[in-house]
Image: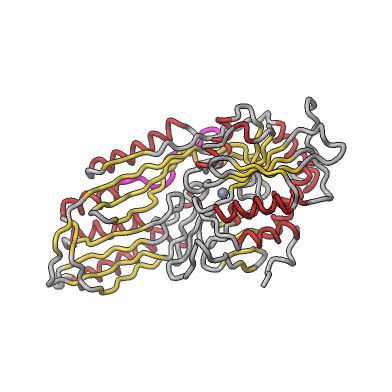
Amino acid sequence: MSVLTQLTPGAVWSYFEEICKIPRLSKNEGKIRQYLLEFAANNKLESREDKVGNILLIRPPSPGMENRKCVVLQSHMDMVGEKNADHPHDWLKDPIITYLEDGWVTAKGTTLGADDGIGIAAQLAILTDTELKTGRIECLFTVDEESGMTGALNLDPGFFKGRILINLDSEDEGILYIGCAGGMDTVAVIKHQAVAADKGSDALLISVTGLRGGHSGDEIHKGFGNSVKIMSRILLSLTNLYGIDLNRFDGGNLRNAIPREAFATIIVDNSLTENILKWIDGFRVTIHDELGDLEPDLKISVTDVSVPGTIIERESQVKLLNALNCCPHGVIAWSKEVEDLVETSTNLASVKFLEDNTIRIVTTQRSSLESSKHYAAAMVESCMILAGAEVVHSDGYPGWKPNLQSEILKITKNTYLQLFGKEPLVKAIHAGLECGLIYEKVRGIDMISIGPTIRGAHTPEEKIEIATAQMFWDLLTEVLGNIPETGKK
Ligand SMILES: [Zn+2]
């Protein structure tokens, strides 16, 4: 049953509802790509697809508007798939179930995909709006933004003509974004020996759950709990105090999400089990005191499990836990020029026990300064090297430096003021937008990023504020109408 049809702007929400039915995790964009190409064919629009799967759909200029500068509208077609562990959802085939709550649209148990489904929906609404009068509009839909930006990274600058680009992937109505941070991944791999567990012991499964998580860029400064850090602290303390053995430790999921859950199985001498449980009771109080109201739903639970066959040998356990305890997480520096802008940060995103006695630790670094991004990555690397890990860095992506003289900024600011009677804020963002990569390829392209208000992106709490979708639509369509002719300012 349709739940979004009564919302406005009608076309945007009805396309959004359609998109919610299409599975589109990063690197699994086949179905949404097919949908977009069929959409172009059904609406007799020119379409292009490049070798990595990016798609361009073209709205021809309205009669009399042929001389207007061409504008590229850009969104990404993939989404982050995060769900609560107890919520069944097959990301390759199940639709996202939306519902309305207090003026917001959200999803049952999963990410909503308004990041960036609402951008896609706005593009489709513009491509089919017969009332709108605009110059040539090129709608660019990139693949794989969320897991490496390989779509933007492999974009051919000749794929589109426009030299003004409006990115539809930011999440704050009332804020115009004119810059973003660059980012990179640092991945550590630790090899260990498995040894037989002592059969006369107890085995306990410790779970850290209920944290808020959040986007590792936009929300890194909020001080939310990190399940991997909390679990490392528990395990290292129990190792030092009670000599526990570790069977496995898995926490976190996606590289660009602050980890919300972690699980570890430990083996303990059964004469110490009671003391260990008491220590955990005490720690629960400590951590609630530290995080306070920021993490009201944090849960640390312990259950008895059957004793597993193996543990990791003590030396690797100690090195692993010390490395995770020492590994930086959170804000490293604030911008000296732009107020309230995080300059450099790092996210300890996940730890996974894999086959072949291998432990994989994934971290991501962001900064508006290239050199600081590399320095943050080097700090993480140092920690991991001390633990005997092998460390690799991804190439990463560059930031997008603000241009306060930008024409599209001026147009968007003026249009906003006329429409809503107030000045919008103009900011840079501590997150990656594809704009940094696009700018590297198309030097001089004039860009801005706008969007409706989305909260909790990359978590099952993701939601979009309904009223701001209308404002986003009004701003976008007015701006498109206000684009000057070529050669004019
Ligand atoms: Zn996005």
**Res 78 visible:** yes
Q: Quadrant of the C terminus?
A: top right
Most extreme residue toward the right is 64
139 or 396, which lies in front?
Answer: 139
Magenta-drawn segment: 327-337
Give whichever of 488, 140 is nearer the camera: 140
Q: Is residue 352 above or below residue 344?
A: below
Q: Quadrant of the N terminus?
A: bottom right
- Asked if residue 347 is positioned above or below residue 240 in the image, the reply reads above
Report x, y in % for residue 427.
61, 40
| Image point (46%, 53%), residue name | 257
- Which quarter of the figure has residue 352? bottom left
Horizontal and vertical percent for residue 15? Answer: 69, 58
Q: Is residue 335 magenta?
A: yes
Q: Position of residue 125 (x, y in %)?
A: 73, 52
* Residue 293 located left or right of residue 50: left
